[in-house]
Image (cartoon, rainbow, N blue to C red):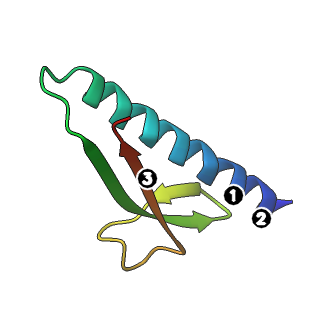
Amino acid sequence: KQSAEAVKKAMNTIYNTARQVTDTIDSLAVKPSAVEVEFGIILKAETGALIAKGGAEAAFKVTLTWEKK
């Protein structure tokens, strides 16, 4: 149960991070043709999902990429 909850929190963290990135890009006067964001996620039963410092500690490495269509 704790594992499922930690994964759910990780997905929520990824969603919120992606939302912040897209909001920031949308607010730019000149938008890039492509954007790539890479970060690490640490899963901890007691605290849920946290963005890792430097990515070296991460249990999961997440890369989100947007390309202009």
- Disc 1 marks a residue whose amino acid type is Ala
Name which residue lies at 36% across and 79% down: 56
- Disc 2 marks a residue whose amino acid type is Ser
CA distance for labels 2 and 3: 23 Å
- Mark 1 Cα within 10 Å, few/some/many (few <14, many 20+)? many
Name which residue lies at 36% across and 72% down: 55
Pick out the residue farthest to the bottom: 56
Q: Quadrant of residue 23?
A: top left
Identify residue for label 3.
64
Upstream in sequence: badge 3 or badge 1: 1
Could you tell me which secondary element the residue under label 3 belongs to? strand
Identify residue for label 1.
6
The relative height of residue 47 versus residue 66 in the rendered view (above or below) is below
- Disc 3 marks a residue whose amino acid type is Leu
CA distance for labels 2 and 1: 5 Å
The relative height of residue 12 versus residue 42 in the rendered view (above or below) is above
Are discs 2 and 1 less than 8 Å apart at CB? yes
Residue 18 percent coordinates (x, y): 44, 40
Identify residue for label 2.
3
